[in-house]
Amino acid sequence: MLTRGFNCALLVTLITFNLPASAGEVQVAVAANFTAPMKIIAADFEKATGEKTELSFGSTGELYTQIRNGAPFEVFLAADEATPAKLIKEGRALAESRFTYATGSLVLWSAKPGFVDNEGAVLKKSAFAHLALAAPKLAPYGAAAIETLSKIGLLDALSPKFVQGESIGQAYQFVSTGNAEIGFVALSQVYANGKLTSGSVWIVPSNLYQPIRQDAVILTRGKNNPAVRALIKFLKTKQAQDVIRSYGYTL
């Protein structure tokens, strides 16, 4: 009887361990540039369905490393196409679930009104000591910034002024706090409801960097959680897409 009881207890433990984090909750890894819209979408999702989300924000590269190291994420909203594709190849994500939820835009931004002109000519002047950007190896927006500077012939001249953040969120903080006079950030960080929220900005022409197509994917840990499928479905609704567009993304 003791052996049988022990085996039953072990079976219950194993079953519990393999269940989703909790019924009606989704663990979501979100690229830092999508912080503001995702907070709104998550709140709308909860109101519409009763399901809850646990959001974790960071650079795409950081979140990828956490997923590989066993972080309990069930859905990944990346800032690129390549990282979700890599997770699928590694058997960590479901291929049929992958889709582009937004296409982002790169901007040069200053917290100071009038400091950045609408053609980016400020980059050719010596009026600033620090230029913030996200680490290009971790964040697609950082890679886009490097590509832009290379194409306009200013990469070598401006690289000594770089202040690199681990994510686009940190690059934004450098500029917003005045630790850098200007920086490359995501349009969604400085734009809401169809207008610039603060400072001055140059919207970088899209021909200066590869399109920033941001893909979402269900991770294998979330394949049996009904709330995961509900969230993916909600991201494709007009309600969610209107929020995404309001932050300057295209679909």
Image (tube, helix red, strand yellow):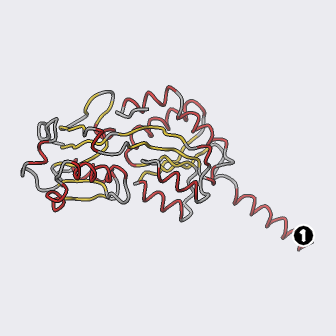
Q: Is residue 93 above or below residue 122?
A: below
**Residue at horizontal 37 percent and vertical 40 percent from the top:** 104
Give the residue at mark 1: 4
Crowdedness near tag 1: few (<14), some (14–19) or many (≥20) residues, C-alpha within 10 Å: few
Q: Position of residue 6 (x, y in %)?
A: 84, 70
Instruction: Identify the amino acid type marked 1.
Output: Arg
Tally the numbered discs.
Answer: 1
Residue at the (78%, 61%) spot, across then down: 12
Of 153 and 32, the residue lying toward us: 153
Residue 86: image location, x then y, percent: 52, 56
User: Where does the N terminus fall, quadrant-wise?
Assistant: bottom right
Q: Is residue 59 left or right of residue 28?
A: left
| Residue extending farthest bottom | 3
Residue 250 lies in quadrant: top left
41, above or below 19, in the image = above
Residue at position x 50%, y 32% in the image: 44
**Of the pair 78 and 110, the residue shown nearer to us:** 78
Q: Position of residue 237 (x, y in %)?
A: 53, 28
Residue located 11% across and 44% down the image: 122
Q: Secondary structure at mark 1?
A: helix
